[in-house]
Amino acid sequence: MYSIANAVTPEGNKAAGMAFLEANAKKSNIVTTPSGLQYEIVTPGTGTRSPTATDSVTVHYRGTTIAGEEFDSSYSRGQPATFPLNRVIAGWTEGVQLMTEGATYRFYIPSELAYGENGAGRLIGPNAALIFDVELIKIQ
């Protein structure tokens, strides 16, 4: 297994992400979609419908690297975020459509459904797999 600690290059990030997701997929509570997105239901929703990609949603979320380093959190800012679902990374667009209002899911997003070869900012390196806890508050 590839060590996350060794993931300092784009190739290392890709290998670490693949190894992490491969091990994670073996857990009984993890669902893997055909695209490679993995998720677990932390809290089932109470809503009656799921959003579509063209809906706007209001969510609380926390994003971390697979090593556990937080890079973004609406919880830390004390305010949920609202945005069109088709204007975020592909892993979010796909995953949030599986949820209903009131649900909290944890998404394990392979790099190709996240920021890919470019990465994003100082904490999200090229080819990095990411983890997001997402609470769907409202569908607009």
Image: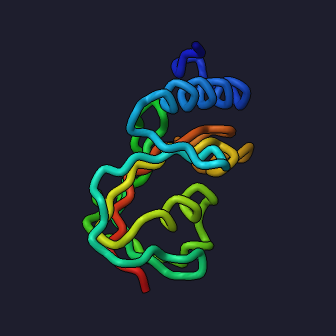
List x then y, in percent, for residue 134. Answer: 38, 58
Query: How many callouts does the rendering have?
Result: 0
Q: Farthest residue in the top direction? A: 1
From this view, report whether residue 5 is shown above or below residue 98: above
Q: Is residue 17 left or right of residue 108?
A: right
Camera-side residue of 80 and 99:
99
Q: Which of the image's four quarters has the N terminus?
A: top right
Taking the spot 41% from the left edge, 77% from the top edge, the residue there is: 49
Q: Is residue 136 left or right of residue 117?
A: left
Residue 122 visible to an observer of this rendering? no
Camera-side residue of 81 and 133:
133
Taking the spot 63% from the left edge, 59% from the top edge, the residue there is: 90
Camera-side residue of 112 and 78:
112
List x then y, in percent, for residue 70. Answer: 40, 43
Taking the spot 53% from the left edge, 82% from the top edge, the residue there is: 55
Displayed quadrant of residue 117:
top right
List x then y, in percent, for residue 126. Answer: 68, 39
Displayed quadrant of residue 67:
top left
Q: Is residue 62 left or right of residue 110?
A: left
Taking the spot 25% from the left edge, 66% from the top edge, the residue there is: 78
From this view, report whether residue 80 is shown above or below residue 14: below
From this view, report whether residue 57 is shown above or below residue 12: below
Residue 27 visible to an observer of this rendering? yes
List x then y, in percent, for residue 140. Answer: 43, 86
Q: Is residue 88 left or right of residue 116?
A: left
Q: What colour scheme does the image use?
A: rainbow
